[in-house]
Amino acid sequence: MTVTAITTTQIDIDSDVLAFLKSLPDEYLVCRDEGHWWERNISGYLREALEGSPHKFVYTKRSRCRHCGNERVKEYGPDFMWLATRYSPPKNYYAKGFKVPSWAVSAYLLSIQGEQQQELNRRVRRSKTA
């Protein structure tokens, strides 16, 4: 069975999206493709609820992604029912002025692996003929 690797020239990704993906650190790409690796509750506290909330107090739980540093704040009511989640992504995590579809991140990562595999195959073939 022959396996053909995919390359960036074979995928139809908008040039702005491709340039953005190429600019991202590996940690950002992994998180955007596979999801974050959240630390277990790095802090939690009880605080007074914001004005207009039906609750007097809310429990707030903070965590941070071990890969990219994205911060997540989850809020729960007094009965520990989830109320809201807010994120504080690291600088340049999101593109400005356009959306990056999740399929584009996966396709880009596969194409990088494909290009690396093709280069490795070329080296192996050269070493066998040398």
Image (spheres, rainbow, N blue to C red):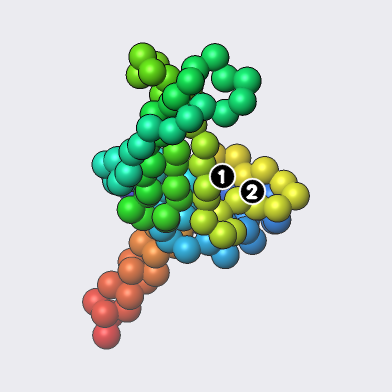
Quarter location, residue 123: bottom left
Helix, strand or loop at mark 2:
loop
Residue in the foreground of this view, choosing between 3 and 9: 9
Q: Amino acid at mark 2?
A: Ile
Tell how many labels. Answer: 2
Percent from the top left, x then y, of residue 26?
43, 61
What is the crowding at mark 1: few (fewer than 14 residues within 10 Å), some, or many (at least 20)?
Answer: some
Residue 77 lies, with reference to residue 26, above or below; the image says above
Percent from the top left, x then y, of residue 21?
57, 57
Residue 100 lies, with reference to residue 52, above or below; the image says below
Percent from the top left, x then y, of residue 110?
44, 50
Q: Is residue 46 visible?
A: yes
Quarter location, residue 44: top left
Percent from the top left, x then y, of residue 45?
36, 37
Residue in the foreground of this view, choosing between 4 and 53: 53
Q: Which mark is residue 104?
A: 1
Look at the image and tell me in which quarter the C terminus lies.
bottom left
Residue in the foreground of this view, choosing between 37 and 21: 37
Q: Amino acid at mark 1?
A: Ala
Q: Would you say 100 lies left or right of 112 here?
A: right
Q: Is residue 110 visible?
A: no
User: What's the residue at 64%, 61% (across, down)?
Assistant: 19
* Tags 2 and 1 touching, CB below 8 Å: yes
Q: First in sequence: mark 2 or mark 1?
A: 2
Q: Residue furthest bottom?
A: 130
Q: Would you say 94 lies left or right of 114 here?
A: right
Name the residue that disc number 2 marks: 13
Q: Which mark is residue 95?
A: none
